[in-house]
Structure formats: C-alpha cells, structure tokens
Image: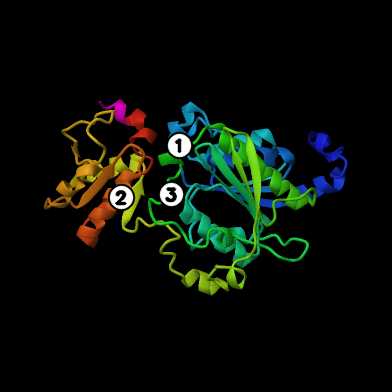
Amino acid sequence: MSERYNRQVILNGFGLSGQQKLAKAKVLVIGVGGLGCPALQYLAGAGIGTLGFIDGDRVSISNLHRQLLFKTSEVGRLKVELAAISLSALNPEIIFKPYPYFINQDNILDILRDYDLVIDGTDNFNARYLINDACVLLKKPLVFAAVSGFEGQLAVFNVPDVNGISTNYRDVFPIPPEKGEILNCAENGVIGVLPGIFGTMQAAEAIKVLSGIGRPLVNKLLNYNLLAQSVYEIELSPGPAGSYVRAKDENSFLSLRFENLTADNAGVVEIDFEELQIIKAKGNCLLVDVREVYESPKLSSGEYRQFPMSEIEKLMKENLLEKNIVCICQHGIRSLGAGEQLCEKYGITKNIYSLKGGIARWKQFFTSRL
C-alpha cells in the first residue's frame, strides 16, 4: 500500500483493511460546487479507487469564495474538466471519471449503476428528489447535505441500521416545496466556509460507510449552526408504506413525469455567453434585461431593452415580433421566471432563452463591451 496513506493505515480500527476497502470503492459526486469540491478533494486524498463527478456548469466569479478547486483565471471553463486536472495532480494513483453534463431522468440510472455510493452536492430541490429516487430504486447509499446562510444539514440515506431499517430523503421531506417557497444559495446567500465544512463531512460519512468504521449518520439528520457552533441530531423513521418514492422499477421510473422534481422552467432554454453570441448573430433577436433600473453594470440601451421584473406586465402586453427572445438578469434566476411567463404567452411560436448565471457569472464579457 502506498506511503501516501500511511497516516490512515496506522489508525487503530482502520488499518490496511480499511484502506483496501477504499481502494476498491467507486464513489459518484453529483455537483462540483461548494459541497462537491471539498468532498472530491478529501475523497481523492483518502484513496477512493474510482471517483466520478458530474456537472455541466462552468466556473463563475461568484463561485470562488467557496469552491476552492478553481482559480480566477479559470472563470468560464467547465468545472469537471478543471476538477479532473486538479484532482489527478493531487492523487494520480486513482481513477477519475468526469461527466461534463447535468444529471437528468434519462441518464441518472445508467450512471449510478456503476457506483457503490453517491454524494449529493447539488443546490436545488429538483435534483435532490431525482437523485434520491434513483438511489432508492438502485439501492445505492446516498450522502446528503444542504447549506444556506449560516446553517446546514447532513444525513446518510438508504443504509439499513442494525434493525434493517433505512430512510431516504422523502421520508424527511415527502413533498417538494413550491417554486420560490425556499430560497437557494444564489438567492439567500451562504458563508463561504459552510459548504467546505459540509462537503468535508460528506466525505467523512462516505469513508465511514465504505470502510465500516464508526457510526455513520444512518436514520439521523444532523443540523449545524455556524454562528452558534451548535449541533443537534434528529432521529428519522420511514414514512407511510416505507417510502414516498413512487417508482418501483426502472421502467416506472423512466415513465414518470417529475413535474415538481425536475427543472420547472419547461420551455425556457438556459444558455451560456458563447451561445448568447451565436443567437445574437442569427438576428431576429430581442435581448431583455429584467433587472431593476438601479442595478449595475448598465447595459447598452442599443442592444438591450429593460423590462424590470417588477414591471414585467409591460413586456407581456407588447406584440413581440422577434423569433428569439433572451432574458438576462444578475444571477439567472429572475430571467428564468420572465422566460416562463413568455413561454406561457407565446408557446412554441418563439424561442425563449435565459442566460445561465446571469451578468454576475459573465461580468467580464459584459463590462469589456461597455
């Protein structure tokens, strides 16, 4: 066994057998963000045999206060590509499998099938329910974490306790929240060290489950408040009939319509800055800035028309002639909402787009043109 892992191997209760178990393990991290970055770094350092990580997102400047795998010079590049380079340099002895796209209902079962354990590093409810249902169906242990503001939660799902009882995410949160009911990190904010703490804790729980050491957070939900440094646990138990998960086999999973579980911006296509330039070049395009008038940076009035979300009804009353409509805001959240309203009005007669990550993510491109 490599000298690299000596400090782990000499641990009483872990030893060579624990390290060998990690070397044989395959772990998938979904989301290479605030949670996924530290989880990946510590799992790579620990010697997990195969590390997969999936994310179709690119680095934005607002990521850097908490996603320490990335550098300022790498803004705009694919996260999984950068992660693969950095993690391979950290530990060239293990196998890395980057997936440069987002998880969805069609690909999740095929991807998860090859792994022993899944870490949920996503930051939205749509993905959490989808990942949970797939893990329950395939009987894959799932290490869950969620952070917002100064607080976070952590749990290990789909692992039976000594009595053979296991719980999943739907046993804790059976009904997905309504849109806008609970703010995500982009809207509510998060202190940078918090996802670092929880991503590291996710890695710790994964190591415990895979190596068989300690007491993983099975059927427990850990709650942590950074400001008070307070921690408490909640005991979990299965919901009615053992689970709220609707899919009982793979065919039923694939045939389900996840109306409240997958992206609810149906009809709106999220694009990056390069795709925006392609759409603009085609012509017959309306660029709509849905920020409030006091927000900066200001965009060229010759290229963009401003319809703040607080006055979006003015846009809805117009007879838009353009075939392609691109909505833009500060972080890509309000633009999705505006796009949805436009989709409801125009249906398939127009192509509706939203700039993913908004001006904050692509600020260097916008400011260079002002």
Where residue 51 sits in the image (x, y, percent)? 65, 47
- Residue highlighted by disc 3: 182
Query: Which stretch did the figure color magenta?
Result: 366-370
Q: Does the magenta stretch include residue 367?
A: yes
Decide which of tag 1 and tag 2 comes sooner along the chain.
1
Where residue 329 sits in the image (x, y, percent)? 30, 39
User: Mark 3, residues whose alpha carbon is within 10 Å: few (<14), some, or many (≥20)?
Assistant: few
Q: Can residue 122 be seen in this view?
A: yes
Check disc 2 and report its element: helix, strand or loop. Answer: helix
- Residue highlighted by disc 2: 337
Is 346 in front, or is 366?
346
Instruction: Point out the frontmost of discs 2 and 3.
Output: 3
**Residue visible at 57% across and 36% down?**
194
* Callout 1 amino acid: Gly
The answer to whether 328 is drawn above or below residue 370 in the figure is below
Q: In this view, does 312 lie to the left or right of 116?
A: left
**Residue visible at 44% across and 65% down?**
258
- Residue highlighted by disc 1: 189
